[in-house]
Image (cartoon, grey):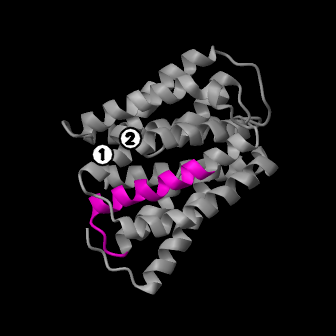
Amino acid sequence: MDFIITPTIALLLFVTGMAAGFVDSIAGGGGLVALPILLSVGMPPQIALGTNKLQGSFGTFSAALNYVQRGEVKIKEAGVGIVATLTGAALGAWTIQHMDGGAIQGLIPLLLLGVLIYTLISPDFGDTQRKANLPAPMVYTLFGLLLGFYDGFFGPGTGAFWTTAMVCFLGFSMTRAAGYTRVMNFTSNVVALALFIYLGNVAWGAGLIMATGQVIGARTGSSLAIKKGAALIKPIFTTVVFLTTARLIYQYYR
């Protein structure tokens, strides 16, 4: 796609990428920052969605790599989840090409609202590492397939669902859950991105400018999350979940 990038638009995209990467590396929801800007500079919706996946993939990779390098994530432990997420995302991306996603759009805000309420009424949610309630391979397989499918099919709120599942069922702290969530998000993002590229729905110039900002923002945000832990992650997490829920409710019921 031909998309004219003026110096002003380039600066806006770069700064937006940094902001989106910072937020997404801590609590997910970077699309809430990036997508409106992409639409505001005149991109058609499908191009904006594909470009958002491109720049977001760079951010999730940068954040995931930082969590791995800092010892918060062990890739071998996440192997089952990566494979399951990859499989689920491929199935979801294929399915959305053959059916209407309208039915799921009304359900997701309610599930996210449940996540928000549970987080708010659990004052020690993710504060410390705890004993797992279910075997890790079971959790990674089940949620990898389900959330991978959901991210390939629809997407918003995937990070919130992953973080909640890891805290509740694996006993992860918020910091550790944030790290493993970025790994799973990157996996499903790549699948969705491949589909957008195949369909030609990516503005490469704009996406790569934002990707540069994403890498910087994601590295900064994930480093802060590792340093500050739940004290930083929880308020940003609840804010992102609230804003995502509100946006989805508005879009579906308006």
Q: Nearer the viewer, residue 16 or 112?
A: 16
Where does label 1 land, which residue? 195
Residue 237: give x, y in percent of width and height.
63, 48
- Left or right of 126, for residue 201: left
Which quadrant of the view contains residue 107?
A: top left
Pointers 1 and 2 in contact (CB under 8 A)? yes
Three-letter amino acid code of the residue under disc 2: Val
Residue 134: give x, y in percent of width and height.
63, 15
Q: Is residue 163 above or below residue 241?
A: above
Badge 1 marks a residue whose secondary structure is helix
**Image quarter hosting the N terminus:** bottom left
Q: Identify the residue shown where x is 63% and y is 31%.
A: 75
Q: Identify the residue shown where x is 75% and y is 55%.
A: 224
Give the main secondary structure of the magenta stretch.
Answer: helix
Q: Identify the residue shown where x is 34% and y is 62%.
A: 48
Where does label 2 land, which residue? 191
Residue 53 within the segment the image draws in magenta: yes
Distance from the alpha carbon under mark 1 to that under mark 2: 7 Å
Residue 234: give x, y in percent of width and height.
70, 46
Residue 18: give x, y in percent of width and height.
58, 66
Q: Nearer the viewer, residue 227 or 234?
A: 227
Residue 218 seen in render: yes
Residue 238 seen in render: no
Query: Residue 151's mark?
Result: none
Which quadrant of the view contains residue 23?
A: bottom right
Three-letter amino acid code of the residue under disc 1: Leu
**Image quarter hosting the C terminus:** bottom left
For label 1, count other residues whose C-alpha is less than 10 Å away and answer few (under 14), some (14-19) or many (20+). some
Q: Which residues are magenta?
A: 41-62
- Left or right of 107, for residue 70: right
Badge 2 marks a residue whose secondary structure is helix
